[in-house]
Image (spheres, grey):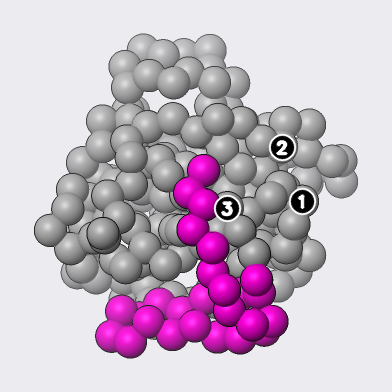
Amino acid sequence: MNKRTFLVGAAALAIVAGAGVSIFTREAEAAVQTGAQAPAFSVRDASGATRTLAEFAGRTVVLEWTNHGCPYVRKHYDAGNMQMLQREAADANVVWLQVISSAQGEQGYLDGAGAQARVRTDNAAPAATLLDPTGVMGRAYGARNTPHMYIINGQGRLVYQGAIDDRPSARPNTLEGANNYVRAALADIAAGRPVATAETTPYGCSIKYAT
């Protein structure tokens, strides 16, 4: 886990000038504990709009850290697996947000137009693609891989974090028979049950944060 600590006073707003990213937080470890309140954020999406966690209050939110050049990500997109999950979530009124924390010049970095083009190319269906080139949002959540998945419940608490499934491989044939942790967690939430598997070890490419 990334152990960077954000020493910001309670309910303070940290603004990264020119980066389009700000994080509301309190004194806390950067990595969020499962069951804890998820860090609020205010981040520009690929269309230039500011998106906040607060605007989705009362709804389940999925955060998907992504890097279009990562073979582990490509396994899920080239097979249509991630897009299927995104559409299932949308049909269930779940908010799905992609997050790109690759720094400019690093693998996976995309500007707004590039991110929108990538969504079209992949025939993806996120509610929005959030741009986090400074890595402030990624580090606040402790995101370290692509894909790295988080689920926030309607009360704003983190109820799942970790891998997308139990097959830590970039080989497409490993999708067959995989246990998809995100789908299972969303089913638990929809049924009003505690998430049975609330935390797993993420796998994939390292996030190419700004240094």
Q: How far from the left and from the top, in percent, is residue 7?
A: 57, 74
Give the class, few, some or many, for how many residues have Cα within 10 Å of label 3's Cα (few <14, many ≥20): many
Foreground label between 3 and 2: 3
Give the number of the disc on residue 31: 3
* Residue 92 in the figure: left or right of residue 19: right
Residue 51 higher or lower than 182, as above or below: below
Q: Which of 144/82 is in front?
A: 144
- Name the residue: 84% across, 41% down: 194
Label disc, if present, on residue 84 of the rendered structure: none
Q: Amino acid at mark 3?
A: Ala
Query: In the picture provided, is 63 more to the left or to the right than 210?
Result: right
Residue at 37 percent across and 32 percent down: it is: 204
- The dot on residue 198 is 2
Sooner in the amino-acid sequence: mark 1 or mark 2: 1
Element on which disc 1 rests: loop
Q: Is residue 20 inside the magenta stretch?
A: yes
CA separation, marks 3 and 2? 15 Å
Tell me which residue sits at (42%, 50%) in the image: 65
Q: Earlier in the sequence, mark 3 or mark 2?
A: 3
Graded by Cα atoms within 10 Å as few (under 14), some (14 to 19) or many (20 or more), the crowding at tag 1 reads some
Compared with 57, 85 (above or below) is above
Region of the chain picked out in magenta, as a range: 1-27
Left or right: 80 in relation to 59: left
Asked if the residue under mark 2 is in contact with the one under mark 3, i.e. CB atoms within 8 Å, the reply is no
Residue 83, quarter of picture: top left
Indicate which label's residue lies in the foreground, 3 or 1: 3
Q: CA distance from mark 1 to mark 2?
A: 9 Å
Q: Say how many tags the image has.
A: 3
The amino acid type of the residue labelled 1 equals Gly
Badge 1 is on which residue?
35
